[in-house]
Amino acid sequence: MENKQPSWLKPVVEIGPLIVFFVSYKFGGFMVSTAAVIAATVLAAAVSYAMTRKIPPMLWVTLVVVVVFGGLSLATGNKTFFFMKPTIVMALFAVILFGGLIARKPLLKSLMGSAMELDDSGWWKLTLRFALFFATVAILNEIIWRTQPEETWATFKAFGILGLNVVFILTQLPLIMRHQIKQPGE
């Protein structure tokens, strides 16, 4: 039997490691924050598993990339690995979603279908938009870490990407409302 996910779990698991990264960066610098976010992401995955007996796919991807690239940064002392982590995660999500569209399968439906019901046209449009969004954020991360001071990048990683996600999702609400399948009695 699958455990129901508590309402606090998703925000804590998604935002908790970002807050840990930002606070530890401010007080301990880059390498301390890298170690802290690795620990926080592992803990987030453990909490998610303990509460629901599963780890969501996006958290799995984030966990693997944070541990691998954060670990490489710590082991080599080279920050570049960690700077590229958001690029790799976002690009991977974009490639997966674009690949699904090419294979004629809007993968967002399988990821988010339990949260909302959309008609097929809505799933196709939303999947394409998310793929384009993830690709754009990957490019933006590359521009910021390569052209801006480290502290600017750290703020962007912790709060800019989160803010862009919130704004993007809000801008998708009209599409979601137009393509939502109404249940009998609604």
Image (cartoon, rainbow, N blue to C red):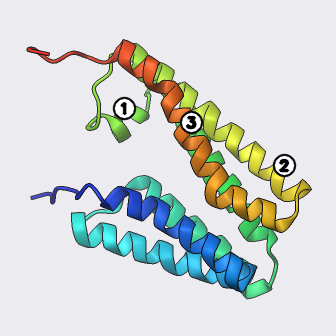
Q: Secondary structure at mark 1?
A: helix
65 and 24: which one is in front?
24
Q: Residues within 10 Å of mark 1 (few under 14, many from 20)?
A: many
90 and 40: which one is in front?
40
- Residue 111 visible within the image: yes
Q: Amino acid at mark 2?
A: Ile
Please tell me whether residue 124 is drawn above or below residue 97 in the rendered image. Answer: above
Residue at the spot of label 3: 167
Are discs 3 and 2 less than 8 Å apart at CB? Answer: no
Could you say which quadrant of the image residue 94 lies in? top right
- Residue 64 visible within the image: no
Q: Amino acid at mark 1?
A: Lys
**CA separation in Å, label 2 and label 1:** 31 Å
- Describe residue 143's horizontal placement relative to residue 158 as left or right: right
Front: mark 3 or 2:
3
Q: Quadrant of the N terminus?
A: bottom left
Q: Quadrant of the C terminus?
A: top left
Please tell me whether residue 109 is drawn above or below residue 91 in the rendered image. Answer: above
- Describe residue 17's horizontal placement relative to residue 144 as left or right: left
Residue at the spot of label 1: 109
- Describe residue 164's horizontal placement relative to residue 138 as left or right: left
Among numbered discs 3 and 2, the one appearing first in the sequence: 2
Front: mark 1 or 3:
3
Give the residue displayed 75% in from the left and 51% down from the top.
141
- Which label number is shown at residue 143? 2
Among numbered discs 2 and 1, the one appearing first in the sequence: 1
139 and 150: which one is in front?
150
Q: Residues within 10 Å of mark 3 (few under 14, many from 20)?
A: few
